[in-house]
Amino acid sequence: MPVENIIKGKVHAICISEKRGTEKHRVESAIFKVNYGIEGDAHAGNWHRQVSLLSYDKVLDFNKRGADVKDGAFGENLVVEGIDFRNLPVGTVLSCGDVILKMTQIGKECHSHCAIYKRMGECIMPTQGVFAEVIKGGVIQTGDIMTGKLPPNDAPIRAAVVVMSDKGSQGLREDKSGPKAEELLSSAGFDVVERVIIPDDKERIKRELIRLCDQRQAELIVTSGGTGMALRDNTPEATLEVCDRQVPGISEAIRAESMKYTKRAMLSRGVSAIRGRSLIVNLPGSPKAVEESLEVILDTIGHGILLMRGTDGECGR
């Protein structure tokens, strides 16, 4: 759905909870701290989900169906009237007084159904809520005006790194390929929004890729590990099952270059594919292979990602 470049709304409610697992309650004003969240809120911290936001219009629609929920019942920090957060892209900058927030995630995974879900059969926070980090601190009061500005077309490409390793995820082995991938991506101008390490479990890999594509809206996801012929190497299958289109030339180029160093490169089953507007590229699990692979593709894949953004020209000579 198209949206205007500048969006405006009004803060209907500010909600906090002093302890995790307890329902949030309204306060008339709150102090927002840089790279932390709301002072006194149990969900604040040095992570990407520092502040949660929900559109008041969505709450009203939900209550018309008999939900009868109060502000804060969904675990939201800010309820804002007039802004449809769900249709804004990650990277949107929200300003309210002196406070500046930057959207980092759309929706969330519901791990355990809350009382609202059990009563209504659904909960709108996992699908309609968004999260943000605090870029500039200050005070927000109920009734304050909030404005939103969409990210520019030339914003850095958002990237994420996912390492598949049973031992690494248990802390039994130091992961070096993930930091190497993050270092190379950052040096090339990509905005690395997240780096995670997970077990070689197919369903877990699928969930993580879906989250990074759909909720974090990472435009490039580089995976490391799980591309060989061992029985626990599930990364290519997991990638293909969550994607819509393949980009075989990327993985072909990686294997062709790797064959110059070792014939074992022919055993790599890594794939490259697209989910929505996110490109997922499977790389081998060693730091050296990660470096060699990224050197092959980094100067080219940016063009493809900008094509998906709709901000770059076609490939014709």
Image (tube, helix red, strand yellow):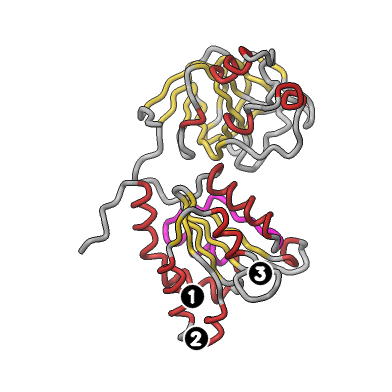
- Give the magenta range: 179-199
Q: Residues within 10 Å of mark 3 (few under 14, many from 20)?
A: some
Check disc 3 and give the amino acid type: Asp
Observer-side mark, 3 or 2, equals: 3
Provide the secondary structure element on which disc 1 rests. helix
Residue 153 occupies which quadrant of the picture? top left
Residue on which disc 2 sits: 261
Ranked by sequence position, the earlier of labels 1 and 3 is 3
Residue on which disc 1 sits: 292
Q: Which mark is residue 233?
A: 3
* Number of numbered markers: 3
Check disc 2 and give the amino acid type: Tyr
Does residue 163 appear left or right of residue 300 in this picture? right
Q: Residues within 10 Å of mark 1 (few under 14, many from 20)?
A: some
Ranked by sequence position, the earlier of labels 1 and 2 is 2
> Mark 2 and mark 1 in contact (Cβ < 8 Å)?
yes
